[in-house]
């Protein structure tokens, strides 16, 4: 089968590998139809992805078709021929986090395409309980469910409601997913990004209340003026940029919540007296839960979430290694790129 392997930073190679189609109990064989390219893939390509080793088959935003099932598949909703979104978080099921319903941060978690090989291939075997079917959604839509799950989980972590003033820093796909669910919870939404194009996209596609292109000396006072004298009650930083993540403390309202959706390889520091004086709640958000996938698919099927405009770039699977470099260039204005099989 055709497979794209990231041998080392900057080296994506199209190759051909054999597949063992012998299915274990409760396992499914998938035909991959769409692969969304996300920030994790770009970071891995650049050699800046934490918890990563090479060589690796990338790809964890997947729209796929079930073509075979192993014995013992207990989920009656999964049958051969289903179109499915893949939940790429392989949790152990027995650690304390899993027992407490926090499978997204399992102590032994392996994410497909990060800790184990992912879906940049024609066929893939996965546990059947990691599949989320839809008779309505397209493969493109199903490949976006995991991206949306990151935002849905982060918004749930922060318990966003209609009284909140939310600032989302970073208007890439993860930031957009946060905006989408903050909007569903009827919060007032400000978005900050250096790219006016991304800000305009967020406003046009989802709808925001404030768009902010920060200057180098952008301050708390600047933000207060924009927000009518207020500061955000919740800030989501979706940049994965150390400077942005640490500056966010100073932009938060007293008693507010700061949610780190992006991450970087390094240490976060803050001035403790100010942290206590403001009584800041600092939250990390990682991955998503199975219920997030189910709820997102339902909302997409009902038309509450429309992601058609999100896919700005596509390429044939065979051409992906050649195209990948160009999508790293800010001038390409990629929102979401996708490979088609």
Image (cartoon, grey):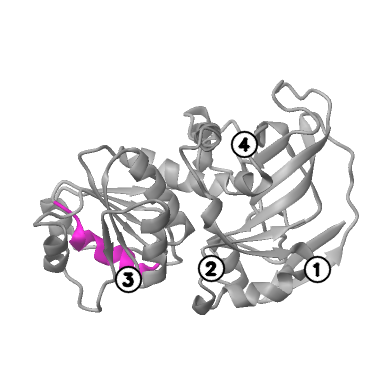
N-term mark: 1 or 4 = 1
Residue 334's disc number: 2
Q: State the residue position of label 3.
A: 243
Q: State the residue position of label 4.
A: 92
N-term mark: 2 or 4 = 4
Question: Mark 4 and mark 2 in contact (Cβ < 8 Å)?
Answer: no
Bounds of the magenta span? 241-253
Question: Mark 4 and mark 1 in contact (Cβ < 8 Å)?
Answer: no
Residue 14's disc number: 1
C-alpha span from label 3 to label 4: 34 Å
Q: Element type at marker 1?
A: strand
N-term mark: 3 or 4 = 4
Residue 131: x %, y % from top left: 67, 35
Q: Element type at marker 2?
A: loop
Does 98 sit left or right of 63 as displayed?
A: left
Residue 234: x %, y % from top left: 25, 49
Question: Mark 4 and mark 3 in contact (Cβ < 8 Å)?
Answer: no
Q: Element type at marker 4?
A: loop
Q: Is residue 199 above or below residue 329?
A: above
Question: Mark 3 and mark 1 in contact (Cβ < 8 Å)?
Answer: no
């Amino acid at each position: 089968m055709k497979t794209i392997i990231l041998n080392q930073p900057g080296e994506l190679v199209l190759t051909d590998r054999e597949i063992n189609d012998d299915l274990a109990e409760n396992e499914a064989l998938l035909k991959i139809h769409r692969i969304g390219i996300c920030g994790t893939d770009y970071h891995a390509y650049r050699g800046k992805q934490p918890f990563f080793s090479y060589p690796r088959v990338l790809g964890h935003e997947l729209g796929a078709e079930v073509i075979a099932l192993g014995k013992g598949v207990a989920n009656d909703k999964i049958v051969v021929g289903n179109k499915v979104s893949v939940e790429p978080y392989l949790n152990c099921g027995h650690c304390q986090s899993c027992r407490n319903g926090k499978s997204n941060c399992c102590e032994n978690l392996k994410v497909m395409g990060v800790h184990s090989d992912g879906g940049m291939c024609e066929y893939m075997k996965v546990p059947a309980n990691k599949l989320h079917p839809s008779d309505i959604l397209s493969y493109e839509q199903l490949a976006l469910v995991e991206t949306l799950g990151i935002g849905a989980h982060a918004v749930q972590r922060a318990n966003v409601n209609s009284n909140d003033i939310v600032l989302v820093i970073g208007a890439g796909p993860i930031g957009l997913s946060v905006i989408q669910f903050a909007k569903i919870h009827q919060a007032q939404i400000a978005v900050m990004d250096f790219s006016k194009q991304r800000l305009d996209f967020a406003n046009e596609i989802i709808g925001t209340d404030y768009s902010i292109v920060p200057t180098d000396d952008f301050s708390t006072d600047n933000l207060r003026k924009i927000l009518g004298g207020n500061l955000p009650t919740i800030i989501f930083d979706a940049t994965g940029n150390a400077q942005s993540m640490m500056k966010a403390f100073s932009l938060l309202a007293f008693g507010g919540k700061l949610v780190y959706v992006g991450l970087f390889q390094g240490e976060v520091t803050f001035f403790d007296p100010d942290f206590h004086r403001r009584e800041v709640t600092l939250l990390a958000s990682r991955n998503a839960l199975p219920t997030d996938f189910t709820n997102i698919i339902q909302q997409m099927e009902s038309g509450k979430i429309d992601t058609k405009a999100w896919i700005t770039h596509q390429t044939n699977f065979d051409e992906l290694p050649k195209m990948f470099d160009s999508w790293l260039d800010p001038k390409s204005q990629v929102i979401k790129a996708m490979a088609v099989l």
